[in-house]
Image (cartoon, grey):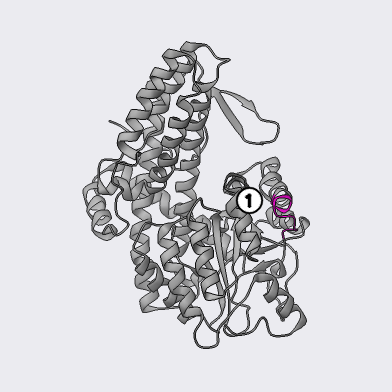
Amino acid sequence: MKMVALWLSGVMIASCAQFKAPSDPYRRISSLDAQYNPEDLQQEIRSKYQTIEFTTLSAYEALVQFDEHLDSRPGPLDENPHYAGLLAARAQIEELEHSILDLRDQLYEAGLNADLSIEERLKNIALLRITIPGAKSDLDALLFQHFHEDFISFTKRVLLDLGKVEDEAVKKSLEALYAELNAQFGPLQERKSLQLDWRVLTAKARQNLKENPDWVLARRNYQHLAHEMRADLVGSKQHKQSAPRFFPSAERAGNIVGTEFPAKVWSLTFDDGPGATTSKKVLANLEVHGLKATFFQLISKAKEHASVAKAIREAGMELASHSYTHRQTPKLSLEQRQWEIETAATDLADIHQRPMKFYRLPYGAGVSNGDIRTRIAKANMIHVFWSVDTLDWMAQAPSEIVERTLKQMKASRHDAGVILFHDIHERTVIASEEVMRYLKQDSRRVCTLEEIVSAVNRGSSPCPAN
């Protein structure tokens, strides 16, 4: 089937009827317009899945190249020519994931909406099936891992909602949907191992696609996205300062990277949580090793997993904002930027009853954008980038994550910097503990960002050695 490439588009279905929730600046679909037929919708969703597949394959190829460059010429992240592509790929993949999962949830909500006609509700439930990802092969499990994890939770949600549906026709349709989901994502379905040989799987897939014109176009698009991200990273380094000092600013002083830290001073950071189960495991490991870390939380997740967010706070960890929903900030409207930066910081401060002093842009996208950086500074926050990227967002063995992380740490100029993890993956739980063990050696100091900023601004030494 001929696929329509949507390489630069992560937009929602344009021809759908829409409404705007008062507390959410994103436009949401309430039901499909009659002129938009299921065949067209199916074609568009399949195109998005193909884009995710091709971008992920390109990212795994870049991961091999990134590691090879790290072995041969270890140095700062921005000097690795393959890093910008990995950042751009993740942003592209998750943008499309957002659009598909948003559509799924809105179709599902419409299917449960008793104010709609039975015909409309059944139509929305039927259309929802289009959004279900493949689950047939090891490659599917690898390329669509984030979808699979989300659909496991969604399957449980459908089961819980079945008892609330009164109309028999709708209930029967939901039961059929649940049976389909349960067969692919239910508890009896064996989940694919994280130890899959992603190098063999992805190399074979790329070889099979080499004559595919859509694949050729995808690779060109990947290079274009990498070029854009590289320009953003280069732009973030334009402002220089003679002496390190940090404070809310759209200039250099308002962007922490970690390369400015004193020798043997490290900051351990975790993004995208809190996770339902993984964050508590990371927290337990930190407590065992007597370390503090900074958790850059998504407000949507902090609300969803409120008890986990509370546990992290009560353990004395540092809390910071990572936006509301993890969208690419440069692509948002001014209203949406305000919501993702300022409103997110205010809401997270309300949840934790403390002001947010630090902010991290999703994917680091927009770090050189004047409007975005000014908004962060006006919210009285300092932006935090990183100097070591574990790349743990990509499915791989924990041992690979550890090896890559330690190589970057050892290549740092002063044995110091900011380490980026994501506390929503089981592989991160395992890998991050190994890194914690390494951080405890050789008189290294693991400090919170506030401890480092205060000490650097005073000209003193941050926190004692571990």
In the visual, does 376 lie left or right of 278? right
Q: Up-down: is 172 above or below 24? A: above
Q: Identity of the amino acid at label 1?
A: Ser
Residue name at image x 29 percent, y 42 percent: 189
Q: Quadrant of residue 447?
A: bottom right
Residue name at image x 44 percent, y 47 percent: 93
Q: Which residue is mark 1?
A: 323
The magenta segment is 348-356
Quarter holding the C terminus? bottom right
Q: Position of residue 156 (x, y in %)?
A: 43, 36
Q: Is residue 296 visible?
A: yes
Q: Position of residue 171 (x, y in %)?
A: 43, 19
Q: Residues within 10 Å of mark 1 (few under 14, many from 20)?
A: many
In the visual, does 333 lie left or right of 365? right
> Does the magenta run of residues contain 417?
no
Q: Up-down: is 73 above or below 191? A: below
Dot 1 falls on a residue whose secondary structure is: loop
Residue nearest the observer in this picture, 244 or 137:
137
Quarter holding the N terminus? top left
